[in-house]
Image (cartoon, rainbow, N blue to C red):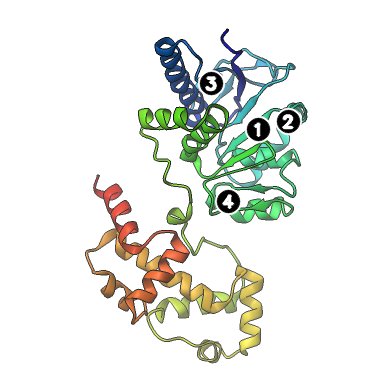
Amino acid sequence: MKPAPLRAAILALDGCYASSLAGFGDVLHVTNAHLSRHQHKTGTAMARSFSWQFVSHKGRPVTACNGLALNTAVPLPEEKLDIIFIPGLYYSGHDGFERMLEAAEPQREWLKAQWREGAALAANCTGTFLLAETGLLRGRQATTTWWLERLFRERYPGVNLQLRSMVTEEDRLWCAGASASYLLQAVRMVEHFCGANTATLTAKTMLIDTSQTTQLPYLPLQMETVHSDTMVAKAQHWLLKHFAEDVSLPELAAALSVSVRTLIRHFNSVLGTTPLTYLQNLRIEISMTLLESGDLSIEEIANQVGYQNASSFTRLFRKQVGATPAAYRSRFTSLATG
């Protein structure tokens, strides 16, 4: 007897990314094809298949951020589900995004009720904010899109944010990073519910690279921070001019006519880091640009950003970025020229 399929709902919201909304269902569709083929060949079920619906609040039509009209006509189900997927939401700015989150109160209450009944909740990219709004992530690990890290931390300080991870899971709460990571997230969930063999078949069929498990290579280390601290701004400008030199804290403080203690206090308050760590990240970020756009050797790049020892530079780069300089260059020059 064929086991009952796992029941999934894909939550459609105004302003969502159509790719992650539909793409999650596409992964389940390909998985089902492999499960069906296996059962046809062997006469036995490899694992439970999936059934899913695209749902919305009161079954109302929604419009994706790219203008695509989505006519789900299916209200939020009251019966118990196994999986609910929350797609990424377009970030139009702080105020608009906050209004979007506030307007989703019915969806939040529905998500909480379904989780209490045993459903797994999965959120992608900015959809993780909606999941965090339920309060379920408090005290649990999560990830989110890297470029909204500061906003996520400020809004949900009780969440154990693991920004380096592409996908996290704890207590049936799945989170994925920036937009396209929904593919890896979906494959991971297929593995959880259907086993590694089925997940591998699905990933191979769809050319999903499951080896990319960290967001680090994609993170600008000096994420833009808007602030009004004149001292820190002058220090940032000075460090940019002298990044390749052997800089000391007393030298930087003297250039700004302040004490070392004052300098450190301002950096920690405004940027959440120390001046020398900022300099180190600045050097790595400049080296990333050189690796992407030029043909300098690793040794030459190390020297240009202030490191006399290429081995030390490589170790530091790998620690900060999650890949060696050579691997980073191979990946991103391929993307640029491919």
Viewer-nearest of discs 4 and 2: 2
Secondary structure at numbered mark 1: strand
Residue corresponding to mark 1: 121
In the structure shown, which secondary structural element does the residue marked by tag 2 occupy?
Answer: helix
Residue beneath label 2, please? 115
Q: CA distance from mark 4 to mark 2?
A: 25 Å
User: Mark 4 to mark 1: distance in Å?
Assistant: 21 Å
- Label 4 sits on a secondary structure element that is helix
Query: Which of pointers 3 and 1 indicates the residue nearer the eye?
Result: 3
Give the amino acid type for the residue marked by disc 2 in the picture.
Answer: Trp
Q: How many residues crowd around disc 4 within 10 Å: few (fewer than 14), some, or many (20 or more)? A: some
Disc 4 marks which amino acid? Leu
In the picture provided, is 118 more to the left or to the right than 123?
Answer: right
Mark with earlier residue (3, 4): 3
Is any atom of residue 272 visible in this view? yes
Q: Nearer the viewer, mark 3 or mark 4?
A: 3
What residue is shown with label 3?
47
